[in-house]
């Protein structure tokens, strides 16, 4: 019996390759892509709910954290040499150069939040594993469809060992800021009466 399975060797890109593609115009500035585990991933279009949740989360964190941290919105985080995702919201250490010479790395990240309207499985599984392998201690996914928050903690090479799902009336505190209480409802887009 003949083996009909074909194995392909994929060329995985490095962050350096990815930056060069952007600089030379291979990747157009208007393309919404990110590098994850050596693969260039096309990001979903942002709906109004997604935009609202990201904006609400940013405003809340900026107001409550003040000068304790830098709030990054849809900007790159360099996890390793093959991953540079652009999380919807990241709370990172304040950098005296405002990250002019590098993107934040895992040791500088306090919390990553992804907002999911159509990307829940990808955000929880694929991105979750990449963030866990990079040792991001606190990772949240805001599910706009079911109006709940997935909280992932205790990272290791296999993924996150702790997963808690909070309903929209839930309250959570980031690991690095235990005195900061955030209501899930505060970061969800408001319901619009029809």
Image (tube, helix red, strand yellow):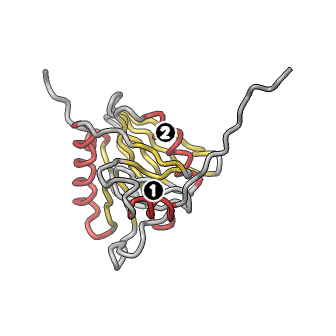
For the residues labelled 1 and 2, say whether their Cβ atoms are less than 8 Å apart. Answer: no
Identity of the residue furthest to the right in this view:
1
> Which numbered marker is on residue 137?
none
> Could you tell me which residue is drawn at 16 percent across and 28 percent down?
192
Q: CA distance from mark 1 to mark 2?
A: 19 Å
155 to the left or right of 58: right
Q: Position of residue 164 (x, y in %)?
A: 48, 38
Q: Secondary structure at mark 2?
A: helix
| Residue 98 vertical position relative to residue 143 in the rendered view, above or below | below
Residue at 65% of width from left, 50% of height from top?
157
Mark 2, Cα crowd under 10 Å, few <14 / some 14-19 / many 20+, is many
According to the picture, the residue beneath numbered tag 1 turns out to be 175
| Left or right relative to 183: residue 122 | right
Tell me the quarter of the picture where residue 29 sits. Answer: bottom left
Residue plotted at (47% across, 57% down): 84
Q: Quadrant of the C terminus?
A: top left
Report the residue at 39% width, 62% height from top.
24
Count of number-bearing discs: 2
Residue that carries the numbered disc 2 in the rendered image: 124
Q: Is residue 110 found left or right of 69 in the rendered image?
A: right
């Amino acid at each position: 019996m003949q083996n009909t399975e074909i194995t392909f060797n994929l060329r995985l890109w490095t962050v350096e390759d990815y930056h060069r593609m952007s600089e030379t115009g291979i990747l157009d500035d208007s393309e919404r892509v990110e590098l994850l585990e050596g693969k260039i991933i096309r990001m979903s279009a942002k709906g109004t709910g997604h935009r609202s949740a990201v904006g609400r989360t940013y405003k809340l964190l900026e107001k409550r954290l003040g000068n304790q941290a830098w709030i990054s919105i849809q900007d790159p985080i360099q996890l390793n040499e093959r991953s540079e995702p652009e999380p919807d919201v990241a709370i990172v250490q304040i950098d005296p150069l405002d990250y002019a010479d590098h993107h934040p790395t895992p040791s500088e990240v306090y919390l990553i939040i992804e907002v999911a309207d159509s990307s829940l499985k990808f955000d929880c599984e694929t991105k979750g594993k990449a963030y866990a392998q990079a040792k991001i201690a606190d990772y949240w996914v805001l599910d706009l469809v079911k109006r709940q928050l997935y909280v992932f903690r205790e990272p290791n090479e296999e993924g996150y060992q702790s997963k808690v799902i909070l309903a929209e009336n839930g309250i959570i505190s980031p690991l690095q800021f235990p005195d900061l209480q955030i209501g899930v409802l505060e970061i969800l887009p408001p319901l619009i009466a029809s």
